[in-house]
Amino acid sequence: MTRPKTMISRRTFTTLLAAGLPSIAYVPHSSLAQQALLDKPIPSTGEQLPVVGLGSWITFNVGRDQQGIENCTEVIRAFFAAGGRLIDSSPMYGSSQATIGYALEALGRPDTIFATDKVWTNGKARGRDQIKDNLSLWGLPQFSLLQVHNLRDWQNQLSTLLEMKQSNQLKYVGITTSHQRRHGDVETIMKSQPIDFVQLTYNAGQRAAESRLLPLAHERGIAVILNRPFGGGRLIRMAKRNPFPDWARAEGLQGWPDFLLKSVVSHPAVTCAIPATSRADHVHENMLACRGELPSARLRQRMLRHIEAL
Ligand SMILES: NC(=O)c1ccc[n+]([C@@H]2O[C@H](COP(=O)([O-])OP(=O)(O)OC[C@H]3O[C@@H](n4cnc5c(N)ncnc54)[C@H](OP(=O)(O)O)[C@@H]3O)[C@@H](O)[C@H]2O)c1
């Protein structure tokens, strides 16, 4: 994991606080921007990914509303400007793929993108056709990662994705779920199939993946993407109604989005989280979790307990 280069050490920070300099409790954003991005390796290759990506369900499904499309373009512009790379979508997300395609074109096709999409249909032939459509909507020759969405027809679709990887048409293969009732099936696939990624729900309010799936991913060297890191918005809205704790500020955390995201991306098995947003200012807040330090195991437990008690 990349260590921040211009970070004030926690000891210096504590010493300064003790010396009566509470005004440094927030590291100025300009210096945050100069810090190295927090990233983690994809276990199967060692390629580094920033710990925060960008989701697209609902938020980018704006149909043909040009104002909505331009707004999403600004969200994606802010994401790349903050060092973001992984954008996640699916043929299940209405017009989101087309919105992303428009934004990528408008932004000059940033080559740092880690394009992540899904296959969500039945039958091999339909799966292959859908992947072609997905590429055309994004305006890309290839995806970095394709995932079987919600395990739909996973035997057929996974075999196609593994064939594509074998023939260098795809770098990484994965599966997704956001339903706890599918964790048994996810576990079976993680144990039996050569997947690079698993995408699942894990946040301070939904911690079921902690017991089996996260340890299994760690053990088998499978990268983990966290969907619904804000519980679909409920968790972040609830947290923002509460005062931000002084102890969290003293630990260098930069507000609730930073707090919630770091409370989960700091889990050793987790590679990144993919919050979705329709607002560029929220992208700035969320990308703060790519700066500073990741909490220790002890601090992470304190953060999770704090959210549970809210
Ligand atoms: N099975 C699957 O494969 C699966 C299932 C579910 C989700 N996913 C993926 O995971 C992504 C994330 O999940 P999600 O979209 O369900 O939920 P989420 O990221 O947990 O929450 C999104 C909500 O959080 C709000 N939000 C984001 N940043 C905020 C901030 N800084 N302050 C206040 N509110 C903020 C957004 O509202 P604003 O627009 O106002 O910011 C939006 O309503 C999806 O978009 C999708 O790409 C995959």
Image (cartoon, helix red, strand yellow):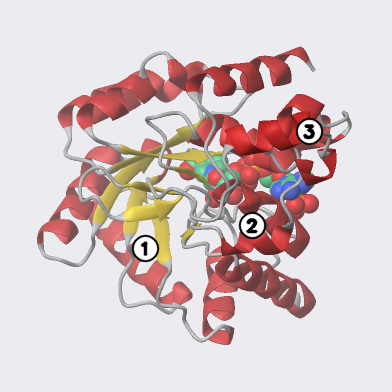
Q: Is mark 1 within 8 Å of ligand 1?
A: no
In the picture shown, does residue 174 fall above or below 74? above
In the picture shown, does residue 31 fall above or below 155? below
Determine which quarter of the picture holds residue 223. top left
- How packed mark 2 is, by other alpha carbons closer than 10 Å (few <14, some 14-19, many 20 or more), is some
- How packed mark 1 is, by other alpha carbons closer than 10 Å (few <14, some 14-19, many 20 or more), is some
Q: CA distance from mark 2 to mark 1?
A: 41 Å
Specify the label residue 32 is tagged with.
Answer: 2
The local secondary structure at tag 2 comes to helix
Residue 232 in the image, given as x and y percentages of width and height: 68, 38
Furthest residue to the front? 19
The local secondary structure at tag 3 comes to loop
Nearest to the observer: residue 239 or residue 197: 239
Specify the label residue 130 is tagged with.
Answer: 1
Residue drawn at the location 27% of the way across and 36% of the way down: 222
Left or right, residue 267 beside residue 127 = right
Q: CA distance from mark 1 to mark 3?
A: 61 Å
Nearest to the observer: residue 57 or residue 20: 20
Residue 272 in the image, given as x and y percentages of width and height: 46, 44
Q: CA distance from mark 3 to mark 2?
A: 23 Å
Q: Earlier in the sequence, mark 2 or mark 1?
A: 2
Left or right, residue 74 beside residue 91 = right
Amino acid marked by disc 3: Ala
Amino acid marked by disc 2: Leu
